[in-house]
Image (cartoon, rainbow, N blue to C red):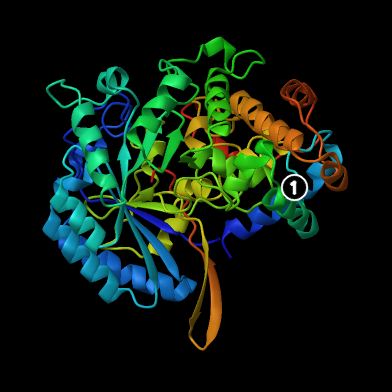
Amino acid sequence: MRGDCHVLTDGIYFINLKFFFMKKRVKLVSNLEHKSILKETIQSSGTEKMDLYKAVFGGKGITNPGTGIGLDNCNVAIEGGGGSAAYSKYDPFLRV
Amino acid sequence: MENIVSFVLKVASRCNLNCSYCYMYNLGDKTYLSQPKFMSMETITVFAQKLHTYCQEKKARYVQIVFHGGEPMLWGKENYKQSIEIFTTVVKDVDFGFAMQTNGVSLTHDWYKLLKELNIRVGISMDGPKEHHDRYRVFHNGKGSYEKVVKAIELGKQYGMSNILSVVNLNISPSEFYQEVKNLGVPSFNLLLPDGHYDNLPDSFEKLKVNTLHHTPYADWLIEIFEIWKTDSDRPMIRFFRTLIELIMGEQTGDQMVGRLTNGVAVLETNGALEVSDSIRACYEGITRNDLNIHTHSIDDLYNDPLFDVFFHSHNMVNDTCLTCPIYDICGGGFLGNRYSNEEGFDNPTIYCHDMIKLVSHIQNDIVNSLPDEVCASLDAKEAHYEEIVEELKEISLIKAHDEIKNKLKSFSLVC
């Protein structure tokens, strides 16, 4: 087995440890329940303050959401090979 | 995401522009001179065959092919028709995302029609208002390319293909830059931080002040853009900001610059050489070169390249400082090339470390302040202030990177 598996295991170990030492938390959610609360709040909000975040998560305010180059991070579910498979149209090459 | 997802094809090794900051030609690497001018169809065919094998072995269902250069449009229309035909015929059961990153100066109606027909998305490099764009993005005779680029962007709007990519230039005021993009009427754009590292800093950095509390020129510029963007009800999408917002809100996303995902990007050089993402070349002459070539090796062999190993895992292979930093899950330690120093190799925080902390905390604070109090309470979400985070980083880190990781990062040091 190559080193990457080892590396990633270490990475996870570090991430878990981090929460014991960190005093500040920047990421707002760390579980699915919180994520769902956050998204629901944003999507149902009618306030101007939330307009930008509503736009980012598929609401109003974006001229042409998700269609531009480099904005193609959408998840796609496809049927194939006798079963369904999901993959992410992940675009790590940020220059486009 | 453990696969290489994005293959950047250097279909032309030369460019019809001579941009002053270009990592290909003007920032430390001259190895392009040993490349053929254009990628051959034989190389495309061999690559497609090996890509098919790779996708089957990895059970990959999606691959992004980015036509890049030099200037990819120099490759010619017929080559695009043939190569798309080869990819879609040879590589079975894979969904392709084709894209091209161009300087835009050669884009015409005919080109747009062809690119639309071949389903190739287009990104145009553009550096703001004429005065600034023309200072950097010039033809070999020194003449600016602004007029031609703007014409190409305008033309692209007719085809729904007008997306721009800009390198942050602190000499342009944020409001002037934003207005320029608004005037162009594009639906989206992306912002890149300039290439550079500790021994070759971008112009706006003062060497002795890098990563000190009050020296955050890029954060200050970006925050101003963010504030303008936030209050614009008819805003274009800015990919960099969107990604940061998504990451702060717990989404699993990212790219070469931010986030914690693997960097599934590989470059196929004009002669078929398989390498790491080419902007790493700004570190030093020949850093990305290895003996791998698609004509003699498999795509999988790239995982054995030490630089690719570090690059692929760069958001997990980071300096000790990052491991206890509250924004590590957002910035992922930053782009690998921006962490380089001749002395420590890649074992440094990014040169944009404090800028990123300031920008990310600004956005995080804005989100927290926009949410109703009861939601913040249920999420236990509180503002994380820049100064407090920087103060926290000064404390001795109790978490250390694994020796093996540290050694890999340091192995690219030029100091014996």
> Furthest-bottom residue in view?
A82
Could you tell me which residue is drawn at 55 percent across and 38 percent down? B241
Give the total number of marks visible in the rendering.
Answer: 1
Judge from the rendering whether residue A45 lies leftward or rightward of residue B153; answer left or right: right
Could you tell me which residue is drawn at 62 percent across and 41 percent down? A51
Could you tell me which residue is drawn at 23 percent across and 56 percent down? B115
Q: Tag 1, which secondary structure?
A: helix
The spot of residue B301 in percent (x, y) is 41, 61
| Residue B126 sits above or below residue A74 on the image | above
Report in which chain the residue with disc 1 lies. A
| Residue B24 sits above or below residue B169 on the image | below
Residue B143 visible (yes or no): yes
Could you tell me which residue is drawn at 44 percent across and 59 percent down? B5
Judge from the rendering whether residue B286 lies leftward or rightward of residue B223; answer left or right: left
Tag 1: amino acid: Ile
The spot of residue B171 in percent (x, y) is 41, 15
Q: Nearer the viewer, residue B228 or B337?
A: B228
The crowding category of the residue bearing disc 1, from other C-alpha atoms within 10 Å (few below 14, some 14 to 19, many at least 20), is some
| Residue B177 sits above or below residue B55 on the image | above
Q: Nearer the viewer, residue A40 or B379?
A: A40
Which quarter of the rendering shows the N terminus of chain B?
Answer: bottom right
Rendering quarter of residue A48:
top right
Q: Give the residue number, with chain letter if any, for mark 1.
A: A15
The spot of residue B212 in percent (x, y) is 64, 16
Rendering quarter of residue B25:
top left
The spot of residue A8 in percent (x, y) is 65, 55
Q: Nearer the viewer, residue B352 or B320?
A: B352
Residue B285 visible (yes or no): no
